[in-house]
Amino acid sequence: MNSSSSVEKKVPQEVLINEQQNQPKRIGIVWYVVLIMYLILLGSTAYVTFFDNNGFASRQDTAQKLAQITNEDQLAFFNEIHENEVQNMEQINALATQSFNVVLGALLGFLSATVTILTGKEEQTEPDESS
């Protein structure tokens, strides 16, 4: 039996710390999950903001009801309902646009923080040799 094979090499703590600091930083699974959640939020708010804007005017039953109007009272009532719907859609669009901007800003902040962490170097506090 060789006694030297059972003896472990002891590595100084400073060497281990330096090796850990020199290793490249990696992105974990949590980062990808957060990124995917941000992208889902961004995609859904972008859809509501840019593609789902004109619900009232694009409905088929609205055109059919407009064709059935026969007198001025019905037309005035339809115009009032249509104006209320337009105001409601404007408020929804303003809220959707604001939500899109918030999610986009959060995503850009997340990516900026990631780049900062991956490329940033920790300041080393070593004594100044010139003193």
Image (cartoon, helix red, strand yellow):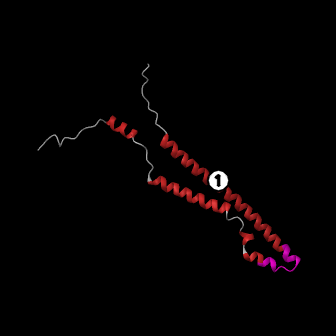
Where residue 112 sits in the image (x, y, percent)? 55, 45
Q: Which residue is mark 1?
A: 101
**Residue 68 magenta:** yes
Q: Residue at x 81, y 79 (%)?
A: 67
Q: Are there few (<14), some (14-19), or many (20+) residues within 10 Å of tag 1?
A: some
Q: Residue at x 59, y 57 (%)?
A: 42
Compared across the picture, whether 48 is left or right of 129 comes to right
Q: Amino acid at mark 1?
A: Asn
Seen as rendered, the residue at the extreme right is 72
Q: How many marks?
A: 1
Image quarter of the C terminus: top left
Where residue 20 sits in the image (x, y, percent)? 37, 40
Image quarter of the N terminus: top left
Q: Main secondary structure of the magenta part?
A: helix
Q: Residue at x 72, y 61 (%)?
A: 91
Secondary structure beneath label 1? helix
Compared across the picture, whether 105 is left or right of 125 comes to right
**Residue 77 magenta:** no
The stretch of residues the image draws in magenta is 64-76
Where residue 95 sits in the image (x, y, percent)? 68, 58
